[in-house]
Amino acid sequence: MYDISDGWFKQARKNPSPNHNERPEKMPIDAIIVHSISLPPGCYEGNDISLFFANELDCNKDPYYDALRELKVSSHLLIRRDGELLQYVDLNLRAWHAGQSKLGERENCNDFSIGIELEGTDDSAFERAQYETLTEVVSALLAYYPDIMPERIVGHSDVAPGRKTDPGSGFEWAQWRMALTK
């Protein structure tokens, strides 16, 4: 069972990111946004995701990184291919993961959501270990933040349609939601 203390998962490897700020005052945390990321795309080795979220990525290392030079982004959590949990931002703070976004009638999803990155691509399958960790992490989040309802656990593509496609076709929403309710 995953435990949260003072906005941090006790079981997570901590890699604090400077890319965060305060949420709007009295803003309830009531959504979870699932993303996918790998740097470079399709590469599941190394520490480049953490370096990117820390603004320390060597953008000369890969041609793909040129488009990332000016970006300042983060996520609360990353689940690696082997199921390892990393945390970058205190859950009570606003991570910069959703960008221009809308869920229901509310815009700026970073204000009220927790961002969870899965190491992967929009068109690849995710690993069983990732689904297991995601289930445990989301179960802990649902217990810790009672305003989050299961129907407000969505993909980045749901809050930024036309702009984002992650977590993509490789994410098995129906199967994962069944595991979450068990």
Image: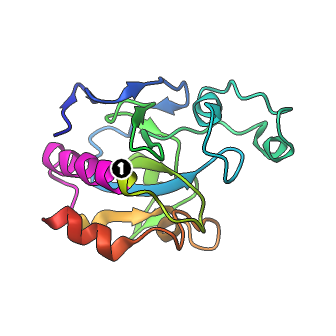
Residue depicted at x 12% and y 65%: 182
Q: Position of residue 140 (x, y in %)?
A: 19, 45
How would you rate the neighbour count of disc 1 (Cα within 10 Å): few for under 14, some for 14-19, many for 20 or more?
many
> Is 35 left or right of 140, judged from the image as shown?
right
> Is 19 left or right of 181, judged from the image as shown?
right
Q: In this view of the protein, can residue 151 be seen by the observer?
A: no
Residue depicted at x 56% and y 54%: 120
Task: Count how many numbered circles sit on residues in the image.
Answer: 1
- Give amino acid for label 1: Phe
Q: Is residue 140 magenta?
A: yes
Q: Of 38 and 108, which appears nearest the observer?
A: 38
Q: Position of residue 17 (x, y in %)?
A: 52, 26
Q: Which residues are magenta?
A: 131-149
Residue depicted at x 60% and y 59%: 121
Q: Is 113 located above or below residue 86 in the figure?
A: below
> Is 176 left or right of 22, judged from the image as shown?
left
> Is 64 left or right of 143, judged from the image as shown?
right
Q: Of 96 and 51, which appears nearest the observer?
A: 51
Q: Of 164 and 139, which appears nearest the observer?
A: 139
Q: In this view of the protein, can residue 2 be seen by the observer?
A: yes
Q: State the SS at label 1.
A: loop
Quarter of the rendering containing residue 19 = top right
Q: Is residue 106 magenta?
A: no
Q: Which residue is mark 1?
A: 112
Q: Position of residue 135 (x, y in %)?
A: 26, 54
